[in-house]
Amino acid sequence: MKLPYAEPYKIKMVEKIHRSTQQQREKWIKEANYNLFNLRSEHVFIDLLTDSGTGAMSDVQWSEMMLGDESYAGATSFYKMKAAIKKIFNFDYFLPTHQGRAAENVLFSATVKAGDVVPGNSHFDTTKGHIEFRAAKAIDCTIDEAFNTTVLHPFKGNLDLQKLEAVLEEYPKEKIPMIIVTITCNSSGGQPVSIQNMRDVKALAEKYEIPVFYDSARFAENAYFIKLRESEFKDFTIKEIVLEMFKYSDGMTMSSKKDAIVNMGGFIAMHNKELYKEASMFNIIFEGYVTYGGMSGRDMNALAQGLDEATEFDYLEARVGQVQYLGEKCKKYGIPLQQPIGGHAIFIDAKRFLPQIPKEEYIAQTVAVELYIVGGIRGVEIGTILADRDPDTRENRYPELELVRLAIPRRTYTNNHMDYVAAVMKTIFNTRHEAKKGLRIVEEAPIMRHFTVKLEKL
Ligand code: F0G
């Protein structure tokens, strides 16, 4: 008999979370203007808003915190992080930053200019934001399968090589500072990219002399899927797979709040010394001196240790296993999800959940609000509110998919919590026909409205 996975750790410290009544939650969410970002965290029972910076550090990471060297320049913590980045990714040059979007800001300051185009696989919002902020354009080259939630494709994060080559053909290389491959692809549902695709992208990039950068927030989860789904690598260790993945990139940006299992931190790493020098200047302006870049020494220590722990098979089996566990349970209840289930989150297909609600009434937000009211669960809308308005016409942009993401923090909740989440979902799903109306926006910011938008129930 094949034995099931079990978490390769036990719990040494716990944090109280707060139950509440449905009546209380109805009041709180109304006061929060039906925007889940406006809730106080103690009014949330199970917080699945994000897996970013919300994981539990290990005892070894906490002891590394005590060894942090807070010297302004040349701290031992910097060298610990440097050694970890060399060992895990094989990059010689790196710059610490305070988080992932800061890494994007520094790297793009050195590389992206007005009128440029940056092809990739469904760039993450902050990545796209930093590109558009520079009056450049992010061009989505994700495979079409990613946009149909029912298609079972093992690597829905893959880039479509024809779409990519069309961009490389159309624009001169001076206008394409880089190709960005996001691993795993958060925006398409935490979906992995195969090594074959990484090899093919790199081959095309070399043909057109364009560098390839990985947005690597969930690189370890991507490696785990490769081990399971790409037969060439089934006998490789996760660390060997990671080294193979990064062979086909020229550099990376990292939000360490995900697969380095720290609460705060990020970095840029690369092979090219000239680029490192140029980016260093921006790092000093925006983040801090090159040997700390917005991070405390203790955080750099914990990050170095976290990279090692996150690239262990047993850890990933339990981590991704828990996400799959929740997804499978929801599927059994008939709840429509993005499939296959992603690495860090499940994505509820809200259009299939509430087909009677028109898109003008914010379908995914309606489901997310219901999840909170019924169960005290906080997810996040990935739909029309997030998609914002068209900058020229000011009309709502209606994305193909209306999703509610439930992101699972690392090593934080037990499978009992997952059972609870699935049961809440089933309760809502069973009464879904009773929902007649969605929500209406009463106030919104001109950009990035999802954080502050105020809504009311119709
Ligand atoms: N790239 C990806 C793929 C991300 O998912 C994120 C953050 C970033 C870059 C930016 O990193 O937050 O450290 O500045 N994603 C979080 C999320 C916020 O909830 O998915 P950051």
Image (cartoon, rainbow, N blue to C red):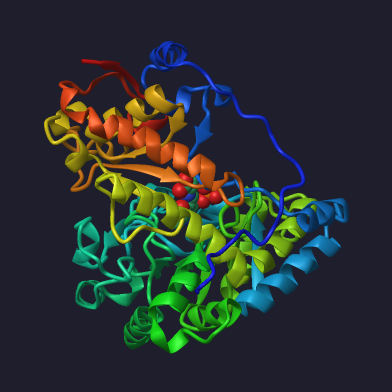
- Residue 61 appears left or right of 373: right
The residue positioned 45% from the left and 32% from the top of the image is: 378
Question: Can the viewer see residue 150 in this picture?
Answer: yes
The image shows residue 314, relative to residue 138, as above or below, that is below
For the C terminus, the quadrant is: top left
Residue extending farthest to the front is: 1
Of residues 151 and 286, which is closer to you in this image? 151
Question: Can the viewer see residue 452 in this picture?
Answer: no
- Residue 189 appears left or right of 90: left
The residue positioned 79% from the left and 68% from the top of the image is: 79
Q: Position of residue 343 (x, y in %)?
A: 44, 59
Of residues 48 and 162, which is closer to you in this image? 48
- Residue 84 appears left or right of 225: right
The residue positioned 56% from the left and 54% from the top of the image is: 258
Q: Position of residue 84 (x, y in %)?
A: 71, 71
The image shows residue 454, relative to residue 209, as above or below, that is above
Q: How many marks?
A: 0
Q: Position of residue 115 (x, y in %)?
A: 30, 59
The image shows residue 343, relative to residue 208, as above or below, that is above
Q: Position of residue 195 (x, y in %)?
A: 41, 80
The residue positioned 31% from the left and 71% from the top of the image is: 154
